[in-house]
Image (cartoon, grey):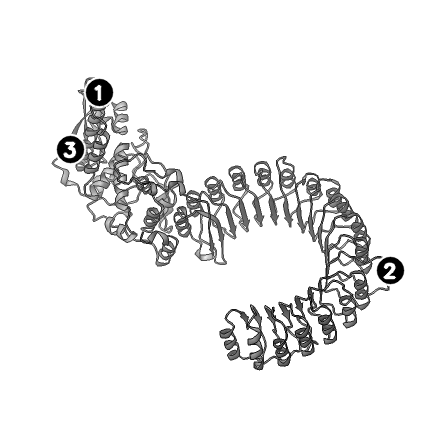
Amino acid sequence: MSKVLGFTGIDDFFPGGSIYANPKEPSLLLSLGRHVDLYFPPQKRSRISASLKRSHINDPFPLSGELFEAEKKQTSIENLPDECLFEIFRRLPTGQERSLAACVSKRWLWLLSNISKDEICSHEKTSYENDVSGEEADVEEFGGGGCLSRDLEGKKATDVRLAAVAVGTASRGGLGKLSIRGGDSGCAVTNLGLRAVAHGCPSLKALSLWNVTTIDDEGLIEIASGCPQLKKLDLCCCPTISDKALIAVAKNCPNLTELSIESCPRIGNDGLQAIGQFSTNLRSLSVKNCTHVGDQGIASLFSSASFLLTKVKLEALTISDLSLAVIGHYGKAVTDLALKCLPNVSEKGFWLMGNGHGLQKLNSLSVASCQGVTDIGLDALGRGCPNLKHLYLCKSAFLSDYGLASFSKVALSIESLKLEECHRITQVGFFGVLFNCCVKLKALALISCFGIKAQNLVLPSVSPCQSLQSLSICNCPGFGDAAMALVGKLCPQLQYVELSRLEGVTDSGFLALLLNSDAGLVKVNLSQCVNLTDKAVSSIATKHGLTLEVFNLDGCKKISDVSLMAIAENCPLIWDLDVSGSAITDAGVTALAGGSMFHLQILSLSDCSLVSNKSLPALRKLGETLLGLNIRNCKAINSRTTGKLSEQLWRCDILA
Amino acid sequence: MASSSKTITVVSSDGDEFEMTMKAAEQSKLITHMLDEFGVSDKVPLYNVNSETMAKVMEYCKKHADHEAAKEEDGGAAIGAGGEEELKKWDDEFLKVENGLLFNIILAANYLEIKSLLDSSCQAVADMIKGKTPEQIREIFNIKNDFTPEEEAKLRSENEWAFQED
């Protein structure tokens, strides 16, 4: 015992110059180097193995000499190896203790964030503790129900933050949603941060990774094994994630219901195949712009027997007709299908999809920028999808009037049809739809279809379309007054009308349509219709005043105070009025305030250069009910007035 | 059952030799393995443990070996119902040492693979940490705060609830 007090510190104790074969066995900690400011927990084990083949012990002291305070004679807690600290931390029973301990130093934070639920000691056996109540043992609550959510973005997304989240949320209900967005300056999250989340947040349900280039498969694989309750996974612009990670997620997270992959070039067919095989609860799938995803992946995914996929979105992929054929055959549960930018899909693909007779439940179909949408293709779809209610076609250059007409004959359930930039469609096609779908069609929209030109149409006498409630015609320069009049005759039950950017239509056209409506108009949007005058607006206000709720006259340059007075007098129910960019003046605003508009909530007067400070009292009066007021670019209103308004209309959101 | 008369000798890093009975030695898995490999005749070198710590560890092993022997003798009757509790109390007192020695004991228990000693000593440290704020913990154990102010602020806000007095 004579040498008991001769203990002088490091050299005697630690294998700095020890007899063992590998005193400084390169642990992962040492290999990280100085630039990494965190501690990498070594292979986590609560026991060291006493294999005598190697130097007795697997180096219980993996710390490098620099981390000691050499002048201390006493061993400090910092000298303990990670596994000993780990043993200590797992005996901190409550989340509160662990959270406080996590704030001590980075090393403590890391070790604590890597404790998983089953590694925490409960207090049942240690009876020498005086605690009798079970309140300390909240091990059961670890991870909780996953009601918390965290968003980390840009520079603030770091591993330390993730470790803090893992420790802090563990006993407070658990982390349910995590989203990490890399900013322009990149983000500092690495696999280590994800590992902390994997250990500390077993109830994670939704994970979203956008633009995170500093992680790779390993991190996601850890999450997959640590968070088996994962339901939603959203990967966008993650070039380092490959199929390996997706396969791990598929195998370990049986509850996966939503998967979205965008611009991940290393994810391909194998990953999708695994999803098809293992993710039996998948309901929603979106794959965009993944160059390695091809027919094999899509086909194997859809043809897996145990599949309940209802929502599918495929965009910017190199898949071909084969994939569509498979979808058409196996997509028995699909209700919403969106296809965009599929350059390798031809007419045959759509024909096969329709003739597969598998899309019986398809409710909503959206096809954009696919050249394969031709007359034949659309006809096949119309026949093959008996429950199709909503169809949206964009940039279908080959679709003709004939195809549209025949589709509208065979599509028995169609309720809403929207065509955008389908330039082969003419008025013939447009009216053909109205004739053929007069019983069920509720909404029709035509946007930027330049093929519509003034034609002399001789129409057969047909009964008007009683079901159509909503009509939108936007930016079709060839649409003129005559066509409007025809539409008016054919659609007496309109309630929601949008006629915007129609430079070819004048008052008579508008009136022919809008005054013909038997049902009262509820929403009218005539924005950017530069030929619209006060006369038409007044007539509309008078006829439909009792039902009108939303009136949009944005950009109608000819509108003046007369319209506002008519509206003020006749439209008590309006809650959203937009007269931006018109010729109204203070008198109009005053008239508005003096009218019976007790429900007005949103008013937009932006770009009205004739509205000045004199409108302040009127605006104040209107402000009693207003929730939103837009007076941007009203050059005659100065900032003092704006200030006064902000003060007085405290409930209102003012844009100035 | 006759108590084993065999003893072995272990050598600490300071060169001091300690004798322990086989029963006591069996408390440590490492020593047991070494004896299996190399036999009892040689002295067992434990150069990772200094004499002060070794003495404490010896005491612990002896106490627990005696306790086990007493249990085996009368099938538990000799110890009685309070036996386990008494042992725990003894452990408690045994571990009331200054921090430096306590950590050395942990390191030794880890190295020598004495599970019960490791459990008790880690629990003792955990009890010291319980109920303290991070500042207090750093104070007690002389730990350097290596968080940047921003990191610390984030950490605090994430764990704010833990700082509230109950």
User: Viewer-proximal residue, B67 or A110?
Assistant: B67
Q: Name the residue under label 2.
A: A459
Q: Nearer the viewer, mark 3 or mark 2?
A: 2
The circle drawn on residue B16 is: 3
Which quarter shows the N terminus of chain A? Answer: top left
**Mark earlier in primary sequence (3, 1):** 3
Residue A472 percent location from the top left of the image = 72, 61
Q: Can you name the residue that lies furthest to the top here?
A: B1
Judging from the image, mark 3 belongs to the subunit labelled B
Q: Can you name the residue that lies furthest to the left here?
A: A2
Q: Please report the residue visible at 19 percent of the width from the left and 38 percent of the height from the top.
A: B93
- Disc 3 and disc 1: Cα gap in Å? 36 Å
Judging from the image, mark 1 belongs to the subunit labelled B
Q: Can you name the residue that lies furthest to the bottom here?
A: A614
Element at badge 1? loop
User: Viewer-proximal residue, A561 or A356?
Assistant: A561
| Badges 2 and 1, same chain | no
Q: Please report the residue visible at 71 percent of the width from the left and 43 percent of the height from the top.
A: A321
- Disc 2 and disc 1: Cα gap in Å? 111 Å
Q: In this view of the protein, can residue A19 be seen by the observer?
A: no
Element at badge 2? loop
